[in-house]
Amino acid sequence: MTDSPEQDAPPSDPQAPTRSGFVALIGAPNAGKSTLMNQLVGAKVSIVSHKVQTTRAIVRGIAIHDRTQIVFIDTPGIFTPKRRLDRAMVTSAWGGAKDGDLVLVMIDAERGIKGDAEALLDSLADVHHPKVLVLNKIDQVKRDTLLALTAACHEKAEFSETFMISALTGSGCKDLMDYLAKTLPEGPWYYPEDQISDLPMRQLAAEITREKLYLRLHQELPYASHVETERWEEKKDGSVRIEQVIYVERDSQKKIVLGHKGETIKAIGQAARKEIAEILEQKVHLFLFVKVRSNWGNDPERYREIGLEFPH
């Protein structure tokens, strides 16, 4: 059974002061950061796929626990960059870490400390905010291994607390939320009570389509593909017409996205339309187009669209 942090929160004391703050989530690619943020916020605000580096820009998800508004900053996975887009994402992730009141450092307990995770821990000395260690996927690992992993992480960096969780099932997430709610500083809330993300709906809709694209084609499609919402029209009948363009770098990739007789793009569109409609709570007419834009990974304008700084 999934524990939803919202349902398990104790009744608020209306006399208690409000608290608020920013909590940055950092980790190696595919450590489960986006899954955790969606779990803690209680709604889909960050896209999740098997493909590494799915989160490209910083996404904020907003949760209320007791009298505290917690603004989670989901950052791109931190790894050794090879290309310009990679460099922009890693710079963005470290920037996000420095923006938080505290930093959750997420480690995949199954993979342990190796490769990108080890490099990340070695770099934490440059992050001066309080750091909390979050071991994810604990249901996949024996207790002795978890204890040894915890000790090894604490040898490499200074953590104020450690939490063992499963982002997928919600196990351990309530304890983490309780800790954050009492640790963040007193102060007014930053966002309205019913807001769950600072991402504009046009961008969130594009992110959802990009997720469906990756879930469908994660083996075949290079991750240098990009989705933009080009038209958003509210209709008189209460529905919305959305037109989006999927940009790829080569004609061969366009054929993969379209699929035989357009079957692939139709399936992607159906999955994206269903989820966008659930979030908007209105009927959605979604139209997808595929265009080739060669070398978009070196185009400063595309970086601004995604919300990244163009690295020179």
Image: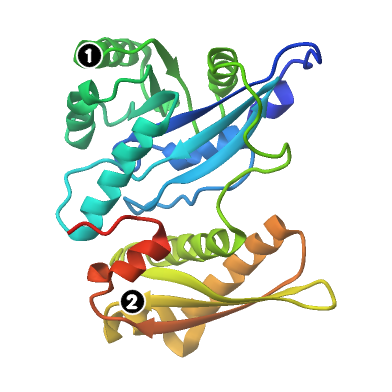
Image position, residue 164 (x, y; %): 44, 18
Amino acid under disc 2: Val
Q: Is residue 120 above or below residue 210?
A: above
Callout 1 crowding tier (Cα within 10 Å): few <14, some 14–19, many ≥20? few
Q: Is residue 216 above or below residue 155?
A: below
Q: Is residue 237 above or below residue 66?
A: below
Q: Residue at x 20, y 16 (%)?
A: 156
The part of the image, by quadrant, that contains residue 304 is: bottom left
Callout 2 crowding tier (Cα within 10 Å): few <14, some 14–19, many ≥20? many
Image position, residue 81 (x, y; %): 17, 49
| Number of marks drawn | 2
- Mark 2 or mark 1, earlier in chain: 1
Seen from the viewer's position, the closer of residues 286 and 69 is: 69
Q: Residue at x 59, y 12 (%)?
A: 182
In this rendering, would 269 be left or right of 227?
A: right
- What is the spatial separation of the Cα atoms under label 2 and label 1, in whole angstroms? 42 Å
Taking the image as drawn, is residue 221 in sight? no
Q: Is residue 263 above or below residue 82?
A: below
Describe the element under mark 1 as helix, strand or loop. Answer: helix
Mark seen at residue 182? none
Q: Residue at x 47, y 23 (%)?
A: 165
Quadrant housing the C terminus = bottom left
Q: Residue at x 74, y 15 (%)?
A: 10
Per the image, the residue denoted by label 2 is 248
Taking the image as drawn, is residue 134 in sight? yes
Per the image, the residue denoted by label 1 is 152
- Nearer to us: label 2 or label 1: 2
In this rendering, would 281 be left or right of 203?
A: right
The part of the image, by quadrant, that contains residue 92 is: top left
